[in-house]
Amino acid sequence: MLDKLGMYLQYPFVRYALIVGVLIALCSSLLGVTLVLKRFSFIGDGLSHVAFGAMAIAAVLNLTNDMLLVLPVTIISAVLLLRTGQNAKIKGDAAIAMISVGALAFGYLMMNIFSTSSNLSGDVCSTLFGSTSILTLTEREVWLCTVLSIAVVLIFLLFYNKIFAVTFDENFSKAAGTNANGYNLLIAIVIAVIIVLAMNLVGSLLISALVIFPALSAMRLFRNFKSVTICSAVLSVICAFSGIIVSILAGTPVGSTIVAVDVAAFAVCCIAGVITGGIRK
Amino acid sequence: MALLTIQDLSLGYDSVAFVENLNFSVNTGDYLCIVGENGSGKTTLMKTLLHLQEPVSGQILMGDGLKQNEIGYLPQQTIVQKDFPASVGEIVLSGCQGRCGIRPFYNKAEKHLAETNMNRMGVLPLKDRCYRELSGGQQQRVLLARALCATQKVLLLDEPVAGLDPKVTSEMYDLIEGLNQEGITIIMISHDLAAAIRYASHILHIGASVFYGTREEYLESDVGKFFLMRQKGG
Ligand SMILES: Nc1ncnc2c1ncn2[C@@H]1O[C@H](COP(=O)(O)OP(=O)(O)O)[C@@H](O)[C@H]1O
Ligand SMILES: [Mg+2]
């Protein structure tokens, strides 16, 4: 089996897939804790549907570089969703449900009416579930993913203390003179970038899993923010790496294999959490 | 000039005022208790003083060289905090965020300040414990230590003893009184009129009728007598 793996690793596209997969998993896990705690998990879900809609439009318009459309549209939606989430009058979750389902339906409609592809359901399926697209990444896409991932990690490291403060207690932060709304905006933009990146890896329906599972798993095991963040990053990277390897060896779809590994890791962490918690008490 | 001067302040949401024309001032070293019925606008007043929301009209002036980021705040507990995986040390240190400004990391002096304040509030031994696993009284001490990291001058406390048992409540009041004697100005919202009368130097009563004055004046006033009687009765 190791021979087979060694043989696969000779191919550049397999190496690209591994690099990109690990980077994306790292990024998506970092903000997971914040999203879960701010009750923002559903925003990730909504945004991924928006990204799907944007991708459908890009496909119809025959854009060569669909990122140019998908990224800005997703970022703008993230900012808008965050705004409505803060507004007490419009129910945030209702707005998100509306936008996400609308974008999903609209995207599929566009693809159905205008697509020239002979394999329509295959196209849709791969945008939703991520299919094999990660194995067909071009060198330019790999670079783009790498640059964006590094930017996300740097932003997270630089603003780690502020993100913690704003997530834990927004009112206290504002009272202490921290620009909490500014940091919320930053968080929204970074989430949007992560979602667009992660779409390449697992497809738009499975993104939330990539964002949320490592954070939830880590929260079973650790009880301070720093350890939870580090643990969820490590878990996410390990799961993505092993998921990609398994999918190459077993020929399973990349996205769902990674998510399956994440779910398994969550189960293990739950059990470990119960055992260590039992010892502590 | 007073530390805080409130002029013709009207409070409310969406420019509908439900408390109108508040006028009072807070001097350095005062212990002001804000009392009133549930829903009378005490929290709203505090949020307005902190500039978390806009006043409907009127002004809040700051004197004695007080800056906006030199106010310590102990909020009513929010839901997010209940299952947040954060250690006591991390939370208290986040009180230094105002000093830190846009600098991304806390420096030695700020970490030292956090330790000092944990010690002051008696929670230093809990430094590595998880916040959500502490008792209610311990949690309030942690938040008080965090507020102290933000200020040397004035603390705004929103119902600091809500949900605490009588023994822990009186410990908390003693702690706050101690801070006041060290020269920190206290502005505290309280449900508990008996405690307000016992500890406060000044009382602000908001609601259908508004009263501001010293504790002695409040006890003599009609609003005070009436409210006191009602609380004793029910
Ligand atoms: N975000 C909000 N939007 C609109 N009205 C609010 C909001 N928060 C509180 N209120 C209303 O403002 C009034 C005062 O609330 P509050 O200041 O919390 O009272 P207290 O702290 O004295 O119990 C209440 O009638 C409440 O219903
Ligand atoms: Mg209140």
Image (cartoon, coloured by chain):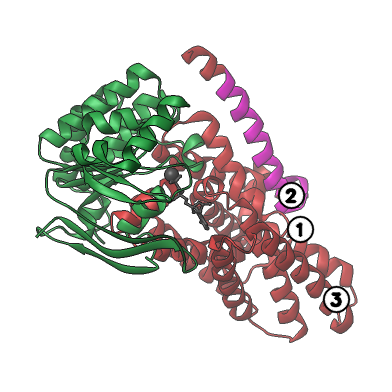
Residue nearer the viewer, A107 or A117: A107
Residue pictured at 54% horizontal, 51% vertical: A35
Secondary structure of the residue carrying tag 3 is helix
> Does B126 sit left or right of B165 as displayed?
left
Residue A44 is covered by the magenta coloring: no
| Label of residue A129 in the image | 1
Q: Residue A98, located in which quarter of the rendered image? A: bottom right
Q: Which residue is mark 2?
A: A256
| Boundaries of the magenta span | A248-274
The red-coloured chain is labelled A
The answer to whether the residue labelled 1 contacts the one labelled 2, judged by CB atoms less than 8 Å apart, is yes
- The amino acid type, in three-letter code, at marker 3 is Leu
Q: Is residue A131 visible?
A: no
Give coordinates of residue B153: x percent, y percent.
Answer: 15, 47
Residue type indicated by callout 1: Phe
Determine which residue is flagged by label 3: A109
Residue type of the residue flagged with mark 2 = Ser
Q: Quadrant of the N terminus of chain B?
A: bottom left
Is A246 on the left-hand or right-hand side of A164? right
A126 to the left or right of B142: right
Q: Are marks 2 and 3 in one subunit?
A: yes
Report the chain shown in green.
B
In the structure shown, which secondary structural element does the residue marked by tag 2 occupy? helix
Q: Image quarter for residue A111? A: bottom right
Tell me which secondary structure the magenta stretch mostly adopts.
Answer: helix
User: Is the residue marked by circle 2 packed among few (<14), some (14-19), or many (20+) residues within 10 Å?
Assistant: many
Q: Earlier in the sequence, mark 3 or mark 1?
A: 3
User: Residue A263 colored magenta?
Assistant: yes
